[in-house]
Structure formats: structure tokens, C-alpha cells
Amino acid sequence: MHPADTTEKYTKIIFCMLTAFVLVAATVCPAEAASRLAVSAEVANTRSGPGTDHEQLWQMELYTPVKVLDSQDSWYFFEDFEGTRGWIYKDLVSEIDTVITKKGLINVRTGPGTNHDVAFQAEKGVPFRVLERKGDWLHIQHADGEKGWIYSALVW
């Protein structure tokens, strides 16, 4: 086989492999893949459609995390920790590291571990900003300023 033929053969193989990789990556990680954002305003309205002319469904407080599924103009279509979907104005969310409690009454501790005292308790659906991560523990802060540590399996 002539060296030029070998080079052409390998070039075609590499091209095919790269094309396959791009196709798989596009399927697994589409360009509009879900991203996680959080409410950055004191209160944000959730709407039934992308615009203020659509019905207000509920309100979310500061640090509430959302998973963005799609966007239209200045609006994001999102899903919350319970799987409920709605629309939010883009200027009301940003890339803030936040979590929300997904279980009933849970303990928020003074340090990262169950050997630390309980600082306060939080009910299901309370959002927090994440200040630090230490193993499976998160140092969190509520919008009212309260801080503590929470076990990561208890939040979304």
C-alpha cells in the first residue's frame, strides 16, 4: 500500500470517529441542556407562559434553585425540585450556588457533622445559598442571614 493511501485511510477513520463522537455528545449533552440557576430577586413570579400577560402561578423567594429546560426571548422555562414547571423572567435568576430542602423538618447544624449542635430546623421547600462544601456537608445561608451546615442528601 502506498504511504499516501495509508494517510488517506487513517484520515477517514479519524474523521469518522470524530463525527461519531460529536453525534453522541450532541445526543447526550444537547446544546439546550438543562442548567441550574437560582432566584436572585427577593420574590419572583412564576408564570404559565413566557410573558407578563400569562397567568401568575406562584411566587418563589430568594435563592430558590430552578433547572432551566428551555428559553424563549427573555424568559426561561424551568422545573423546580418537585418537578413542577413554569416560566420565569431571565433577569430574576442567576448562577448562584443554592439548594432547597426536599424532606420534612431537617436539622441545620453549627458544623459539618452530626456531632455538632442543631442551630435551627428547616421545613421542606426552604432555599439556601451555599457558602462552602465540605465532603457531604454544605455550609448554607438563608435569605434572612441564618447560617448553618446541612447534609447534602437532604437538599436538591
Image (tube, rainbow, N blue to C red):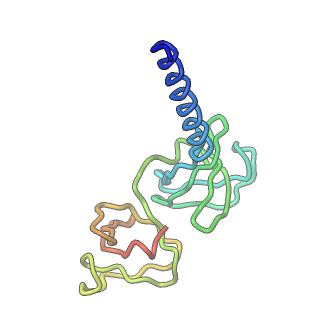
Residue, x 50% and y 24% (percent of image)?
10
Check the image and name the residue furthest to the front: 1
Among the 4 quarters of the image, the one containing residue 152: bottom left
Q: Position of residue 40 (x, y in %)?
A: 46, 51
- Vertical order, 11 against 64 (above or below): above
Q: Position of residue 108 (x, y in %)?
A: 35, 79
Q: Position of residue 156 (x, y in %)?
A: 49, 67
| In front of the other: 132 or 126 | 132
- Vertical order, 58 against 109 (above or below): above
| In front of the other: 72 or 23 | 23
Number of numbered discs on residues: 0
Among the 4 quarters of the image, the one containing residue 20: top right
Q: Is residue 126 left or right of residue 34?
A: left
Residue, x 53% and y 56% (percent of image)?
43
| In front of the other: 81 or 57 | 81
| In front of the other: 19 or 4 | 4
Q: Position of residue 127 (x, y in %)?
A: 46, 66
Q: Is residue 108 left or right of residue 80?
A: left
Residue, x 49% and y 79% (percent of image)?
123
Residue, x 30% and y 80% (percent of image)?
109
